[in-house]
Every structure is written in structure tokens, then in C-alpha cells.
Image: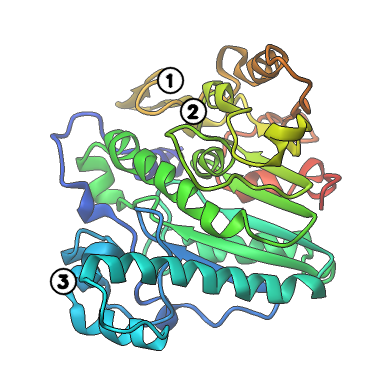
């Protein structure tokens, strides 16, 4: 019981704190080359900042990034020597003004990642993209690390044996420690910083995922990673980048920390599906009506949290609050064309009949219903 309470406080925090400077809680990846072992041959990693720009393959001190508002654009604005050095390595001269060089450089970094992935694609049977959720560090001395989650998941799914190319996405879903999580308002961190980050990261990931040369692309995301995915897949903010055009795009949402309203944008895309009126998306949604994090309701002794899943960032789809999972189908049935209906998988109870309250990724992915999904 105490562990469960601590988990909730870690993930969301107290409701009684004052407003904070959320930049302090940003998750940075400038030092990943020192902290994470090199990726195995079947894994490509994407590190992406809160504005949706990919990190270059160079060491950037995280403390310097934090001083630059946790933004790669701001970092290169403040560090012109590093900017010029990186531009030179990308064969860009000095004749452009600074902001034009930064824009060109960030786009060039994305193109490099596209080329890296496409060079590997022919060697593998399929491509899977993994996207973690809220409050995740990739590395460090504290916290639940996304790199560890990915390693366990890839082992459980036997991706190496199945010859699967894995794209691991590491994004700034923010982080708050257990102590600060209790003192500060973690719910507000989710709503005011992590959610806006997820939107920009999703839009930014289109720079890569929409240009992968594979007939089938699978996107697997956990918790708030579902918000990242929705902004990859649907135009919600007048985006100009293309949505994924692959013939088959399978999307697996595990305990999605979103509401069904995301699917109101389902047919807002910028790819050939709009022209042909053939839906290239297929959703698989794993929900859990007992997930205490998504329900935002918990009692242990004198401590209690009683919120609606729709407060401080909607998480109603992942816990099927008020039948929100079925509401997705209702929304899609109202569209003027025929689309692929999502497949809903209820993981509220274990095979032995006991309820599942856990929110962690592996609390979902270790079960037969997940491991034997038809798209792996």
C-alpha cells in the first residue's frame, strides 16, 4: 500500500503546491553518449527535445542545455562556436545568418536519422517505434528509466530473434522526483508542460517517421506517449509536415493517458490516405479500468487523491472512464468514409481473475494478450 502511494506521489505529486518553473523538470539528453551503452545493431535511437528537434550526435552538457531553456534552438543561439562546428561537419558554410543556420542544421540532423534508418530497413522483417510516457528519464541515478523499460520490452517481445528493427524514442516527458513530487503539483506539471511537449514532439517526429521507407510501420506507445502518437498521426494544429504515409500503420496504445477526443482529428491528415480515402491506420488500444494512476483516485490512511480522469490532463481512454474506449468507435463511425475500427483490449484483470492496478509498462506488456498481438 505504501509503495502504491509513493508511486502515485512520484507520478503526479501533491495538489496543494504553488506554480513552478517547469523548465527545472525538463528531461535532457545531451549526455546520453556517456550514460547509455551504444545501441545494438537492431536498435536506432531518437533523442528529441521539448520543441520536437532531434539531438545531434555530439556531447552537450545537460547543465548548458538547462541554461538554454532545455531547447536545442536556444542552445545553438547561445553557443555559436558549437553551431559553426556542427554546421561545418554537415558541409554548411558561414554565409547564412545564425537563425537560418540553426533551422538548416536541425533539419539536416533529422535527414541524417532518416538515412540511418532507411539504410537498415531492408535487413529486417518489420519496423517498430517505441514511445515512452510521462515522467521518464533515459538515464541517471534516480527514477524509472525509459532505456530500462525498452530493454525489458524488447526482450519480452523477442525482437532480435524476430529480426525486428526497433526505433527507440526518448523525449522530454518531464521528470519530478519523489520528494518534489509530493511538495510540488505534479498534476500541473503534466498538464502545463508534459502535454504541450508531447504535442510538439509528435509533430517533430513526423520529420523522421513519415519518411521511413517501409510498407508497414508499427508505433507502440505507453501512457502519455499516446499524446505524442496522436500528434504524429493527426493534424491538430495546422501542421505542414506529412503524416505517416506507409501502406500499413499499426498503432498500439498501452494504458493511453489521453481521452477519446483525440480521435476527433482522426481523418485530419496530410498524406495519400486523404486522396484515396483508404485508411492506412489500425489502432490497438489496451485499457485498464483499475489503473490507479489513470483513474487519479487513491486512498492510503490519511493520504488521498480523488480526481476525475478528465482533470489535469484527460486520461479517460486508458481507464475506460465513462466508457471512453467505446466512444472512440462512436467517433470513427460518425466519419463520412469507412475507416478501420480500433481493436479494444481490456487488461483490467489477470488471467486468475485478480484486478490489475499497476500503471507501469510491463504491467501490461508481459501478458499473453499483448505478446501474442497479431502485429508483432
Looking at marks 1 and 2 on the same chain, the residue that comes earlier in the sequence is marked by: 1
Q: Which residue is mark 3?
A: 78
Inter-mark Cα distance, 3 to 1: 40 Å
Please identify the quarter of the rendering in which residue 253 is found: top right
Q: Position of residue 70 (x, y in %)?
A: 26, 60
Inter-mark Cα distance, 1 to 2: 6 Å
**Residue drawn at (21%, 84%) of the image:** 81
From the viewer's perspective, is the residue at label 3 or at label 2 nearer? 3
- Packing grade of label 3 (10 A; few <14, some 14-19, many >=20) is some
* Residue 122 placement, left or right of 11: right
Pick the front one: 327 or 268: 268
Please identify the quarter of the rendering in which residue 163 is found: bottom right
Q: Residue furthest left?
A: 18
Pick the front one: 32 or 331: 331
Q: Position of residue 213 (x, y in %)?
A: 72, 62
Q: Secondary structure at mark 2?
A: loop
Q: Position of residue 248 (x, y in %)?
A: 78, 46
Q: Which residue is mark 1?
A: 310
Amino acid at each position: 500500500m505504501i509503495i502504491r502511494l509513493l508511486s502515485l506521489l512520484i507520478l503526479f505529486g501533491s495538489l496543494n503546491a504553488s506554480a513552478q518553473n517547469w523548465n527545472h523538470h525538463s528531461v535532457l539528453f545531451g549526455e546520453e553518449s556517456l550514460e547509455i551503452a551504444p545501441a545494438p545493431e537492431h536498435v536506432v535511437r531518437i533523442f528529441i527535445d521539448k520543441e520536437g528537434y532531434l539531438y545531434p550526435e555530439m556531447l552537450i552538457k545537460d547543465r548548458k542545455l538547462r541554461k538554454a531553456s532545455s531547447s536545442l534552438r536556444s542552445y545553438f543561439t547561445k553557443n555559436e562556436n558549437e553551431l559553426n562546428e556542427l554546421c561545418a561537419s554537415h558541409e554548411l558554410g558561414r554565409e547564412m545568418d545564425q537563425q537560418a543556420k540553426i533551422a538548416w542544421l536541425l533539419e539536416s540532423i533529422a535527414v541524417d536519422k532518416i538515412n540511418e534508418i532507411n539504410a537498415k530497413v531492408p535487413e529486417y522483417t518489420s519496423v517498430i517505434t517505441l514511445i515512452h510516457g510521462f515522467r521518464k528519464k533515459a538515464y541517471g541515478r534516480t527514477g524509472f528509466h525509459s532505456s530500462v523499460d525498452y530493454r525489458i520490452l524488447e526482450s519480452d517481445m523477442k525482437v532480435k530473434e524476430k529480426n525486428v528493427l526497433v526505433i527507440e524514442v526518448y523525449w522530454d516527458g518531464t521528470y519530478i522526483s519523489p520528494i518534489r513530487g509530493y511538495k510540488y503539483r505534479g498534476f500541473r506539471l503534466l498538464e502545463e508542460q508534459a502535454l504541450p511537449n508531447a504535442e510538439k514532439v509528435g509533430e517533430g517526429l513526423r520529420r523522421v517517421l513519415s519518411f521511413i521507407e517501409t510498407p508497414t510501420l508499427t508505433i507502440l506507445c505507453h501512457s502519455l506517449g499516446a499524446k505524442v502518437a496522436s500528434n504524429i498521426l493527426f493534424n491538430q494544429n495546422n501542421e505542414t509536415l506529412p503524416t505517416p504515409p506507409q501502406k500499413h500503420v499499426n498503432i498500439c496504445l498501452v494504458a493511453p493517458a489521453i481521452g477519446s477526443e483525440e480521435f476527433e482529428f482522426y481523418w485530419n491528415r496530410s498524406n495519400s490516405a486523404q486522396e484515396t480515402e483508404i485508411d492506412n491506420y489500425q489502432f490497438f488500444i489496451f485499457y485498464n479500468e483499475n489503473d490507479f494512476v489513470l483513474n487519479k483516485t487513491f486512498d492510503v490512511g490519511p493520504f488521498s487523491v480523488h480526481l476525475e480522469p478528465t482533470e489535469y490532463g484527460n486520461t479517460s481512454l486508458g481507464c475506460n472512464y465513462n466508457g471512453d474506449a467505446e466512444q472512440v468507435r462512436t467517433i470513427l463511425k460518425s466519419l463520412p468514409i469507412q475507416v478501420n475500427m480500433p481493436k479494444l483490449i481490456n487488461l483490467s484483470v489477470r488471467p486468475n481473475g485478480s484486478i490489475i492496478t499497476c500503471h507501469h509498462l510491463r504491467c501490461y506488456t508481459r501478458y499473453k494478450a499483448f505478446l501474442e498481438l497479431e502485429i508483432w
